[in-house]
Image (spheres, rainbow, N blue to C red):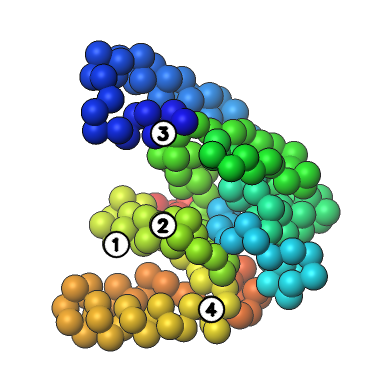
């Protein structure tokens, strides 16, 4: 895998110029594909595992539909599960449905509910596209990959690299333990500021999430 070869500590440094060219080419291809094409957009993260019979899949599909109805393109990792559900909701509502796939050792194909897609070799190039063209992140229940994307977004907001960028967690039952841990072990022990908890909104209410995203998008336009 290209990522694995790049990150190996003992990889031949003589190959670095060629690696840099491949990285630049991938980022450039993403910019050319998406620039000026999506308009306002929201990136939705979530597990690849739940199927259509799962209530969380149905909620993600409803979210995608509502985002499309509010004029937002829906960007996901392009895989199955909750990513597919959000893309499906957006596509069936007549919106832009975007999938950013990634090459993995266990091949994960793009879901069939996309009208714009690109597959990446480098995780960090893909992450750049998730943020570059989005006005907000919505984070559905998920595992390590979802948590990675959540905390990267929080770090960018906390450090002022992106502004008026809401991070919305959907599913209070799923996220309540994490929020308790952040309060008890990060805030109360001084590892994050008290107001850093305000960077996250946890809800089960899709209407609330859409209202916050629209409000913050308008504030972004005013910056």
For disc 1, the neighbor class at 10 Å (few under 14, some 14 to 19, many from 20) is some
* First in residue order: circle 1 vs circle 2: 2
Q: CA distance from mark 1 to mark 2?
A: 15 Å
Q: Residue at x 69, y 42 (%)?
A: 110
* First in residue order: circle 4 vs circle 1: 1
For disc 3, the neighbor class at 10 Å (few under 14, some 14 to 19, many from 20) is some
Please count the marks in the image. 4
Q: Secondary structure at mark 2?
A: helix
The reply, left or right, for residue 12 in relation to residue 102 is: left
Disc number lying in front (3 or 2): 3
* Residue under pointer 2: 148
Q: Residue at x 49, y 78 (%)?
A: 175
* Residue under pointer 3: 3
Q: Secondary structure at mark 3?
A: helix
Q: Is residue 45 above or below residue 189?
A: above
Q: CA distance from mark 3 to mark 2?
A: 16 Å
């Amino acid at each position: 895998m290209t990522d694995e070869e790049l990150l190996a500590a003992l990889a031949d440094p003589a190959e670095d110029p060629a690696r840099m060219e491949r990285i630049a080419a991938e980022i450039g291809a993403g910019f050319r594909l998406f620039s000026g094409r999506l308009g306002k957009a929201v990136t939705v993260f979530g597990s690849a595992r739940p199927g259509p019979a799962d209530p969380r899949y149905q909620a993600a599909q409803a979210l995608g539909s509502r985002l499309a109805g509010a004029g937002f393109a829906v960007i996901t990792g392009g895989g199955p599960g909750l990513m597919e559900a959000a893309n499906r909701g957006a596509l069936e509502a007549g919106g832009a449905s975007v999938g950013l796939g990634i090459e993995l050792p266990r091949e994960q194909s793009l879901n069939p509910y996309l009208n714009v897609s690109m597959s990446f070799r480098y995780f960090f190039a893909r992450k750049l596209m998730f943020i570059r063209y989005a006005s907000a992140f919505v984070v559905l229940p998920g595992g390590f990959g979802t948590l990675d994307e959540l905390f990267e977004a929080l770090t960018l907001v906390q450090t002022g690299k992106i502004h008026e960028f809401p991070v919305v967690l959907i599913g209070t039952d799923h996220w309540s333990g994490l929020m308790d841990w952040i309060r008890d072990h990060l805030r109360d022990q001084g590892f994050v500021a008290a107001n850093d908890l305000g960077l996250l909104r946890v809800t089960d209410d899709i209407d609330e999430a859409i209202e916050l995203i629209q409000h913050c998008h308008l504030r972004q336009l005013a910056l």
